[in-house]
Image (cartoon, rainbow, N blue to C red):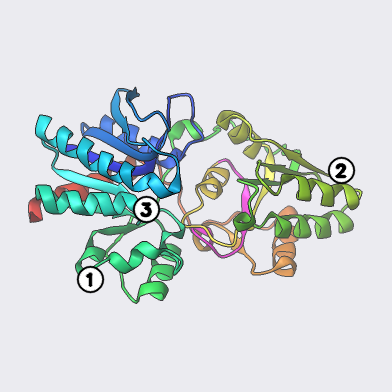
């Protein structure tokens, strides 16, 4: 089976493992199942040239970075896809995010007569996504959610239900199997330091814990526009000995740090899935989170600082590990996507 992926961006090289990790893992797992994959990245990387990524042909269609001229990248993507199809036909088009990638994939599907599926990746289910208005009723049959939460939000936004939910899975290599009960980090957080991730709430919760338990140790890993304001708040509170912010670290080091942490605290305002929560869970962390993404299956949830404080406090002192969710590996995810692809080909 030959499948074309269309995505806003993809890893520019094999060493950039922090660039949309779930897609990287899925691409490798699909190839391992014998699927021939080709990828078109519309806006990133900025090379505008083809390259190989772990043996997979990737086309960067980014000829223009300027937002006003990005529509030209869509045309370039369409051209690359038709050229690839003429060289060797693909049986399925798979786009990611309901946005330009979906638009290109939808037009290609109509032009080439090839079935098209799309994976919703995050905020594309919110009312702010202007591309949702272009979806026809029958297009919803081709959409795949990545969590029940995301499916529910899309229903609230559009009134439409989806047939498919495929949770992300982690790589077996991303699990630290020699787990130890000695976990020197009490509370860990990780992600882009942007307003959407709401790390001001994270700090508020940790401040409450640190006030009551002065020996607590908390670490926040990330970078972004909120780094300096967050660091300033820690300094003003006189808690630099208890709370540390670190820039992004290599992925293997992050996984090791998860295996050394008691609680992973997640405070995002919105999350389509929350891969980092699953990774932390698989490495022995207890998860406390706002009710977003996969949290309702994997975490003890709270809606505000007081509720999250109580959950963190209980988990610090012996609350049993959450057991509703069973860790999924990426091989299972690839198998489910292959079934979707096969069904689309069969129906066609």
Who comes first in sequence, dot 3 or dot 2?
Answer: 3
Identify the element where label 2 is drawn.
loop
Q: Is residue 290 magenta?
A: yes
Q: Nearer the viewer, mark 1 or mark 2?
A: 1
Which region is colored magenta?
283-295
- Tell whether 175 sits left or right of 88: right
Who comes first in sequence, dot 1 or dot 3?
Answer: 3
Whether residue 193 is visible, yes or no, is: yes
Identify the element where label 3 is drawn.
loop
- Residue drawn where x is 40% and y is 28% of the image: 47
Picture layout, residue 260 above or below residue 52? below
Whole-percent x and y of residue 317? 75, 55
- Tell whether 94 sits left or right of 91: right
- Residue drawn where x is 59% and y is 29% of the image: 250
Numbered badge on residue 8:
none
- Within 10 Å of disc 1 (Cα), the crowding (few <14, some 14-19, many 20+) is few
Numbered badge on residue 240:
2
- Tell whether 255 sits left or right of 145: right
Q: Nearer the viewer, mark 3 or mark 2?
A: 3
The residue tagged 1 is: 137
User: Quadrant of residue 165 in the image?
Assistant: bottom left
How many labels were placed on the picture? 3
Question: From mark 3 to mark 2, how far is it between C-alphas?
Answer: 39 Å
Whole-percent x and y of residue 189? 67, 47
């Amino acid at each position: 089976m030959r499948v074309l992926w269309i995505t806003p961006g993809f890893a520019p090289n094999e060493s950039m493992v922090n660039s949309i990790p779930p897609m990287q893992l899925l691409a490798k797992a699909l190839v391992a199942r014998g699927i021939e994959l080709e990828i078109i990245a519309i806006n990133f990387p900025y090379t505008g040239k083809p390259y190989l990524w772990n043996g997979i042909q990737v086309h960067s269609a980014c000829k223009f970075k300027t937002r006003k001229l990005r529509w030209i990248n869509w045309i370039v993507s369409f051209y690359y896809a038709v050229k690839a199809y003429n060289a060797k036909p693909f049986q399925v088009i798979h786009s990611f995010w309901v946005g330009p990638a979906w638009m290109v994939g939808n037009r290609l599907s109509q032009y080439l007569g090839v079935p098209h599926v799309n994976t919703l990746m995050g905020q594309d289910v919110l009312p702010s996504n202007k591309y949702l208005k272009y979806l026809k009723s029958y297009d919803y049959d081709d959409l795949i959610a990545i969590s029940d939460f995301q499916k529910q939000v899309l229903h609230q936004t559009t009134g439409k239900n989806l047939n498919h939910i495929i949770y992300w899975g982690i790589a077996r290599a991303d699990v630290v199997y020699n787990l130890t009960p000695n976990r020197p980090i009490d509370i860990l957080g990780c992600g882009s330091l942007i307003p959407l991730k709401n790390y001001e709430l994270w700090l508020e919760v940790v401040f409450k814990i640190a006030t009551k338990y002065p020996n607590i140790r908390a670490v926040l890993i990330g970078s972004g526009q909120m780094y300096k304001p967050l660091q300033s708040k820690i300094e003003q509170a006189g808690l630099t000995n208890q709370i540390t912010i670190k820039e992004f670290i290599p992925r293997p080091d992050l996984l090791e740090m998860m295996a050394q942490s008691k609680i992973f605290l997640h405070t995002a305002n919105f999350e389509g899935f929350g891969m980092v929560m699953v990774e932390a869970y698989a490495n022995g962390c207890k998860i406390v989170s706002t009710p977003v993404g996969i949290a309702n299956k994997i975490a003890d949830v709270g809606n505000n600082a007081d509720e999250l404080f109580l959950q963190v406090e209980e988990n610090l002192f012996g609350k049993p590990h959450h057991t509703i969710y069973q860790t999924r590996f990426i091989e299972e995810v690839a198998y489910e996507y292959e079934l979707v692809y096969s069904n689309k080909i069969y129906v066609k």
